[in-house]
Amino acid sequence: MKKEIYVHREIEGPLKALIRQFPAVALTGPRQSGKSTLLKKIFGKTHRYISFDEPLTRQRAVSDPELFLDNIEEPVIFDEIQYAPELLSHLKILIDNDRNKRGRFILTGSQQFNLMKNLSDTLAGRIGLLTLLPFSKQEKNRIPSMKKKLKNTQKFFTDACLRSSFPEVSVHPGMDFEAWCGSYIQTYLERDIRTTYNIGSLREFQKFMQLLAARCSQFLNLNSLSGELGVAVNTIKKWISVLEAGQLIYLLNPYYRNLGKRIIKRPKVYFLDSALVCYLTGIRDVRHLLNGPMAGALFENYIIQETIKSYFNKGKRPNMYYLRTHNDVEIDLIIEKSMRIYPFEIKLSKSPNINMVKPMDRFKKIFSKLEIMTGGLICLCDSDVFLTKDIKAQSFNSYLKWLNSGI
């Protein structure tokens, strides 16, 4: 029997704060990101736990929501609430009967689109919202077996790509990751896709996932995907929305505030766990990962996924973008803080040089009216190195420390 290992999550503070502030709190996130484990650990002694993954419980809740809630002792955690959306309107009535009572209901869900739509329609103003993704770099570093193993950015990167950041795989290093990942995707397809959406062919959808994974860190090209798969563009749009809803991918929008028509406005596609990309594209070892054609794209994907986690773990929405002009000025990542923008380039390199940050000079000259602050180059270096008077190559640790200080 596997020994239970609990890793403290960065989101615990914001979660406890919302429990004190709202009658209800919803914690969304991809399947297996640790939502149930977190809630049981933090609120197991104060809240009753009910999961709608259990068919009989789900049937009772759906068939007679009012009777079901009459027999529930508060406060309570409702896990996988998307399977019993009929409860939400009745929860609203209970909350409105005593708006001053906090922390009564904690809801979780792994299909964000349907869940968030129902929550927004029914519990607006009554519920606090948080998103839990798989382990961040900081969280992974708390795992006893990882502390000595993950010594630098390259080690974290390769481990995130070949072993994943999902909690179950991370805390059990002997687990067969390929088998786990295959099971994860199959469960996602069978339980979430087949039961929630009218997708059609699951085989076609899985092929779509593989094609999209091969294009991580690239512009979303609906027409290209449509042509390669032989399905309509509207179908591709729907499938993209499905992956967003399951929080498997993130679409990074361009920064085009007050920049006119010079900007390419298509989003870029990133997966929220780089190991899923590697599994779907057949990357299985360090040599293939670091020397293969997707190496740079995967490192960029990793940096973006960890940046997104930093925001979500603070209870914030990501204030981050990319930029590319029609004359090929491109900035991989733009962080906006208080209307100031910080540009970053992302390079898979241990030997940073000044040529890698030249796009920043062009960017500053073309958009001189913007309040552009000093950014940097995020790479594999283990310590910060100045490349110009203002711009330095940053270790990933240094970048995360800067990022988390201002969120």
Image (cartoon, rainbow, N blue to C red):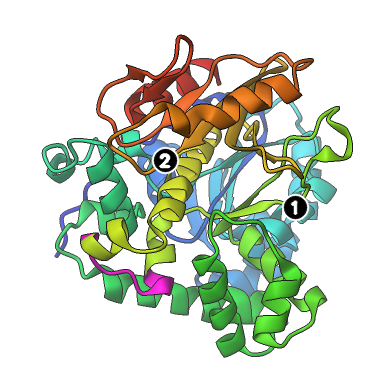
Q: Is residue 86 above or below residue 76?
A: below
Q: Report the side of 48 relative to 197 (left or right).
A: left
Residue shown at 62%/64% (left/top)? 243
Q: Can residue 316 be found in the magenta stretch?
A: no
Regarding mark 1 in the picture, which secondary structure is present there?
loop
Name the outermost residue toward the top: 389
Q: Quadrant of residue 41?
A: top left
Q: Where is residue 382 in the image (x, y as percent from the top left)?
A: 25, 28
Which of the two residues, 406 or 335, is positioned nearer the viewer here?
335
**Image depth: mark 1 or mark 2 in front:** 2
Which of the two residues, 368 or 151, is positioned nearer the viewer here?
368
Q: Is residue 204 above or below residue 339?
A: below
Does residue 33 show up? no
Which of the two residues, 323 or 48, is positioned nearer the viewer here?
323
Q: Quadrant of residue 335?
A: top right
Residue shown at 15%/55% (left/top)? 3
Residue where numbered disc 2 is placed? 347
Q: Report the side of 316 relative to 390 (left or right).
A: right
Q: In this view, does 174 lie above or below 145?
A: below
Q: Report the side of 242 relative to 343 (left or right).
A: right
Which badge, 1 or 2, is on the more N-terminal residue? 1
Which residues lie in the magenta part?
A: 279-286
Residue shown at 37%/29% (left/top)? 353
Image quadrant in which the N terminus is located:
bottom left
Residue where numbered disc 1 is placed? 266
